[in-house]
């Protein structure tokens, strides 16, 4: 049995633009030590994935070989999502807004775009209250085929008007790989919802774009599965990915959702990607949202995604978890105040939480 059957191996990252003969020389040398080498071409550079007899190769200082930029072990590591101690937080640019890199971003708006004047009213209100980006669904994946599925193309036109009238960047959900180009003409950021975290055809297509992606954690997914979904997008060449924790479903009679706030320090430790929290889907009830949003700011999230509606009782989708405009206006200064209080201490808090013994329940 080859050791590749029991361990993932290594990835040797070559310097951009390295000539073919030099790439071949490095590959031949790795194979001479028993490595089973596969060449992988990325965006503007080459990688060599090494399996086989990697024990001997691990003992070599491969990083010192001419043409080699870095060597990464693929045990519990992820090639593109992994945290890099040599690189500070870069954040992700969404229009004029930077997510991550020390900022706390608030994305707000209705679950679904319902009609133009209502969308404009809500957008103007959340902008005045301090929202950085506007969220609104044009295409809605619903459990029931009889539920409101969104306005589709008509909603895209409304979102375009919202941007023109308010100046807010637009975040909206993408369901179908065939719609990427069309929606990207309007949206500043494409959201991959919980149900589509494992839609690998969609993830691969998004990896071929340059538009920022908001990737939500599947409601029954592990952290590793979440990061690997992000890996699909990043490995395709799109480096602008933001993660979003939205809660995990409990198999009870009421199908309640529990917001996994412990995932925030875990993700902050393991990846360089910005991490947001969705306290709306993470609670399912509006009265819980402010407390969970404040908790998200406390544990080190880079922002929140909040559902806001001018009349939640009339909402066509997820009205029970939407804040009113006034409630949202009260929440914004609270989360910013908490964030400011913890500024400079959040990384230490996260490290302490992650390194606490006894965290074996995964």
Image (tube, rainbow, N blue to C red):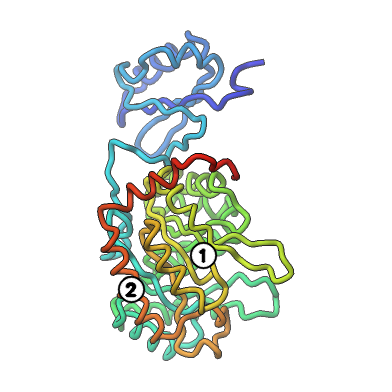
Is disc 1 placed on a helix, strand or loop? loop
Crowd around label 2: few <14 · some 14–19 · many ≥20 (10 Å): some
In the picture, the quarter occupied by the C terminus is top right
Q: Which residue matches tag 2?
A: 334
Give the percent coordinates (x, y) of residue 307. 47, 76
User: Which corner quadrant of the image does residue 156 belong to?
Assistant: bottom left
Residue 232, relative to residue 327: is it above or below? above
Looking at this view, name the residue that lies furthest to the top: 32
Question: Image check: 301 left or right of 111?
Answer: left
Q: Which residue matches tag 1?
A: 174
Q: Earlier in the sequence, mark 1 or mark 2?
A: 1
Q: Residue at x 55, y 55 (%)?
A: 202
> Can I make out residue 138 in this image?
yes
Question: Image check: 1 left or right of 154?
Answer: right
> Can I make out residue 211 in this image?
no
Q: Which mark is residue 78?
A: none
Crowd around label 1: few <14 · some 14–19 · many ≥20 (10 Å): many
Is disc 2 placed on a helix, strand or loop? helix
User: Which corner quadrant of the image does residue 183 belong to?
Assistant: bottom left
Residue 19, relative to residue 271: is it above or below? above
In the picture, the quarter occupied by the N terminus is top right
Mark 2 and mark 1 in contact (Cβ < 8 Å)? no
Give the percent coordinates (x, y) of residue 65. 32, 16
Distance of label 1 from label 2 (alpha carbons): 31 Å
Q: Residue at x 62, y 80 (%)?
A: 148
For the residue pair 225 and 173, the one nearer the viewer reads as: 225
Q: Residue at x 58, y 48 (%)?
A: 222
Residue 174, relative to residue 54: is it above or below? below
User: Which corner quadrant of the image does residue 62 belong to?
Assistant: top left
For the residue pair 129 and 343, the one nearer the viewer reads as: 343
């Amino acid at each position: 049995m080859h050791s590749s059957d029991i361990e993932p191996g290594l990835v040797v990252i070559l310097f951009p633009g390295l000539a073919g003969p030099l790439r071949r020389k490095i590959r031949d040398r790795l194979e001479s030590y028993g490595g089973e080498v596969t060449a992988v071409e990325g965006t503007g550079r080459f990688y060599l994935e090494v399996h086989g007899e990697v024990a001997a190769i691990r003992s070599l200082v491969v990083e010192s070989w001419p043409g080699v930029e870095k060597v990464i072990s693929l045990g519990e590591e992820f090639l593109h999502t992994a945290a890099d101690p040599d690189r500070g937080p870069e954040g992700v640019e969404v229009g004029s807004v930077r997510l991550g890199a020390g900022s706390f971003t608030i994305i707000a708006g209705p679950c679904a775009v319902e009609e133009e004047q209502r969308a404009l009213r809500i957008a103007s209100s959340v902008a005045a209250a301090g929202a950085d980006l506007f969220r609104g669904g044009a295409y809605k994946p619903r459990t029931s085929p009889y539920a409101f599925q969104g306005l589709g193309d008509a909603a895209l036109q409304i979102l375009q008007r919202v941007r023109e009238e308010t100046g807010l960047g637009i975040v909206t959900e993408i369901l179908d790989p065939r719609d990427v180009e069309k929606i990207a003409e309007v949206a500043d950021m494409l959201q991959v919802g919980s149900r589509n975290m494992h839609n690998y055809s969609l993830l691969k297509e998004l990896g071929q774009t340059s538009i920022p992606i908001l990737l939500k954690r599947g409601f029954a997914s592990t952290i590793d599965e979440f990061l690997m979904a992000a890996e699909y997008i990043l490995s395709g060449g799109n480096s602008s990915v933001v993660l979003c924790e939205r809660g995990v479903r409990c198999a009870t009679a009421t199908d309640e959702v529990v917001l996994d706030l412990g995932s925030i320090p875990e993700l902050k430790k393991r990846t360089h990607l910005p991490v947001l929290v969705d306290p709306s889907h993470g609670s399912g009830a509006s009265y819980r949202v402010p407390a969970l949003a404040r908790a998200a700011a406390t544990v080190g999230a880079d922002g929140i995604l909040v559902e806001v509606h001018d009349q939640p009782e009339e909402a066509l989708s997820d009205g029970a978890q939407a804040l009113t405009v006034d409630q949202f206006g009260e929440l914004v200064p609270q989360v910013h105040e908490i964030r400011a209080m913890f500024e400079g201490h959040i990384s230490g808090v996260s490290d302490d939480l992650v390194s606490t013994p006894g965290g074996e329940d995964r």
